[in-house]
């Protein structure tokens, strides 16, 4: 009975050693898995931070583009006002053309009349 007990105990010890070895392997594998997950989490955090900075930069770019568009709209409005002003000037100038033409014609014929009269007077006084 004692030999059987010893043999049984040795068998139990061997079995327990195998169980401990198996558990150690499982612990080692679990540690590797935890390390891999930790690496993945760290990478995901870095990616999230990089994405945050990319989004922030994109928001700044969009804001700058929005400001540029607002400036462009103001420039277009100012140019439109300039064109409207030039149109008014041209319309006013064109509406004054007949009056100016009349004034020029009147002045020319007056000058021509004065010139003829002066010539006649000069010619008469010399003869």
Image: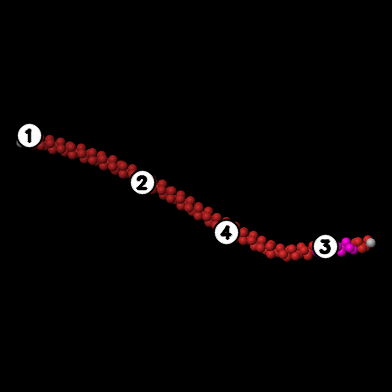
Q: Quadrant of residue 21?
A: top left
Query: Which of pointers 4 and 2 lies earlier in the amino acid sequence?
Result: 2
Dot in front, 1 or 3 = 3
Residue at mark 3: 112
Residue 106 lies within the magenta run: no
User: Is 108 placed left or right of 127 in the picture?
Assistant: left
Does the residue at mark 2 contact the one at mark 3 (Cβ under 8 Å)?
no
Does the residue at mark 3 contact the one at mark 4 (Cβ under 8 Å)?
no
Query: Which of pointers 1 and 2 lies earlier in the amino acid sequence?
Result: 1
Query: Which of pointers 1 and 3 lies earlier in the amino acid sequence?
Result: 1
Residue at mark 2: 44
Query: Which of pointers 1 and 4 lies earlier in the amino acid sequence?
Result: 1
Q: Residues within 10 Å of mark 2 (few under 14, many from 20)?
A: few
Which numbered circle lies on residue 3? 1
Dot in front, 2 or 3 = 3
Q: CA distance from mark 3 to mark 4?
A: 51 Å
Residue at mark 4: 77
Q: Residues within 10 Å of mark 4 (few under 14, many from 20)?
A: few
Q: Quadrant of the N terminus?
A: top left
Q: Residues within 10 Å of mark 3 (few under 14, many from 20)?
A: few
Looking at the rendering, the stretch of residues picked out in magenta corresponds to 109-121
Query: Which of pointers 2 and 3 lies earlier in the amino acid sequence?
Result: 2
Which residue in the rendered view is the most extreme toward the right?
127
The x, y position of residue 55, in whole percent, is: 43, 50
Dot in front, 1 or 2 = 2
Does the residue at mark 1 contact the one at mark 2 (Cβ under 8 Å)?
no
């Amino acid at each position: 009975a004692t030999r059987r007990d010893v043999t049984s105990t040795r068998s139990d010890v061997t079995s327990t050693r195998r169980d401990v070895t198996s558990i150690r392997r499982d612990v080692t594998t679990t540690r590797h898995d935890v390390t891999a997950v930790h690496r993945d989490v760290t990478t995901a955090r870095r990616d999230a931070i990089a994405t945050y900075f990319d989004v922030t930069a994109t928001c700044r770019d969009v804001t700058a583009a929005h400001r540029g568009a607002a400036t462009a709209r103001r420039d277009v409005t100012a140019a439109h006002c300039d064109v409207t002003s030039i149109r008014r000037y041209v319309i006013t100038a064109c509406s004054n053309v007949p009056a100016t033409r009349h004034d020029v014609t009147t002045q020319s014929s007056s000058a021509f009349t004065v010139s003829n009269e002066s010539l006649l007077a000069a010619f008469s006084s010399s003869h």
